[in-house]
Image: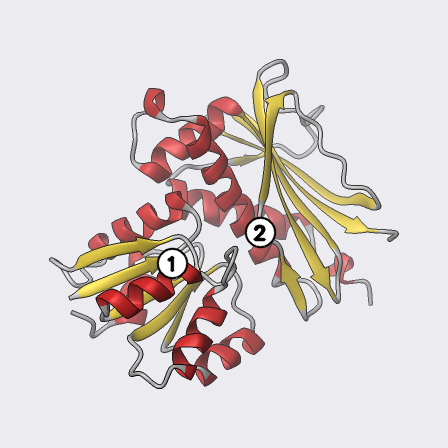
Amino acid sequence: MDPLKELLNEEIVGITRVIWRSVLNLGLQNEEGAPGHQPASGGLAFIGSVQICGAWEGSVVLHAGGVLVRRAASIMFGMEEPAVGSDQMVDALGELTNMVGGNLKALLPAPCKLSLPTVAQGIEPKLTILGNQVVRHVDFSSEGHRFAVSLLKRTRA
Amino acid sequence: MKILIVEDSKAMRIIIQRTLRQAGIAPGATVAEAENGVEALAAIRSTRPDLVLSDWNMPDMTGIELLEELSRGGERPPRFGFVTTESTPEMRQRAIASGASFFITKPFTPASFAQALVPVG
């Protein structure tokens, strides 16, 4: 049986919603069907990813704009937003990605291992994981800022 | 009471400390931090914490490697539990076999800490 048939976008929405609420105390809206998925085009953005290896192989990617990541970091670190630095933003997005990835991994075939998170940042950054293709993608908005969670499956070595 | 938080994310170390306070766990405890198992091993051997809250997946030395190293040491280990994103039955079994006494899964709430850690403090 293809486990992805059982892993619905609603589960990605549910996991992300719980993390947003419990860690950030922020609500979010599922923006499925909205055109595009790039957060805040033209501005600073962050991409966090974790790899899943084992009985199921792929990656979980969280893509968010700098404004939302700064807000998340300020909440997680208990700091005022202007005082939040790049290191805190990377740390915050890495941990959010780790939580989303770890909770999604639990829905995939076992045994699997989760990598440490990797975070890239830049103006409209793009992440290509060679040999992987997107099998699930969900767009969200929180506090008026777009972000996206993608599940990629490894299709070749 | 001395608590050691072992976690590679600074943000999560702060959140765990905040959650301990919100859950009313060991008010007045001294809380120290380590970024990975290697740092934690040194801290445990030098400061003898009463409680260790450790992430599982960390660079250099993971949480389970830390616990297994402690359990091999022949010394009485501190009360040790995991605060981690991953919590499969296999992981729990391996952790319990090495002496872990609780698992708290991320994301967590003050109630999950209170439930796992009572009657600490």
Label 2 Cα neighbours within 10 Å, binned few <14 / some 14-19 / many ≥20: some
2 or 1: mark nearer the eye? 1
Q: Nearer the viewer, residue B121 or A106?
A: B121
Q: Is residue A108 above or below residue A132?
A: below
User: Which residue appears at 84% of the width and 46% of the height?
Assistant: A131
Q: Where residue B99 sits: x, y (%)?
A: 39, 82
Q: Chain of mark 1?
A: B
Secondary element under disc 2, as helix, strand or loop, is loop
Label 1 Cα neighbours within 10 Å, binned few <14 / some 14-19 / many ≥20: some
Q: Is residue A144 visible?
A: no
Q: Are marks 2 and 1 in contact (CB under 8 Å)?
A: no
Could you say which quadrant of the image residue A129 lies in? top right
User: Which residue appears at 63% of the width and 16% of the height?
Assistant: A41
Q: Chain of mark 2?
A: A
Quadrant containing the C terminus of chain B is bottom left
Q: Is residue A31 above or below residue B100?
A: above
Q: Which residue is mark 2?
A: A116
Q: Which residue is mark 1?
A: B39
Q: Is residue A151 above or below residue A84?
A: below
Q: Is residue B56 visible?
A: yes
User: Which residue appears at 41% of the width and 54% of the height?
Assistant: B7
User: Which residue appears at 16% of the width and 63% of the height?
Assistant: B26
A105 relative to A85 in the view: left or right: right
Mark seen at residue B27? none
Q: Amino acid at mark 2?
A: Leu
Quadrant containing the N terminus of chain B is bottom left
Q: How is the image coloured?
A: secondary structure
Q: Where residue B100 sits: x, y (%)?
A: 39, 77
C-alpha span from label 2 to label 1: 18 Å
Secondary element under disc 1, as helix, strand or loop, is helix
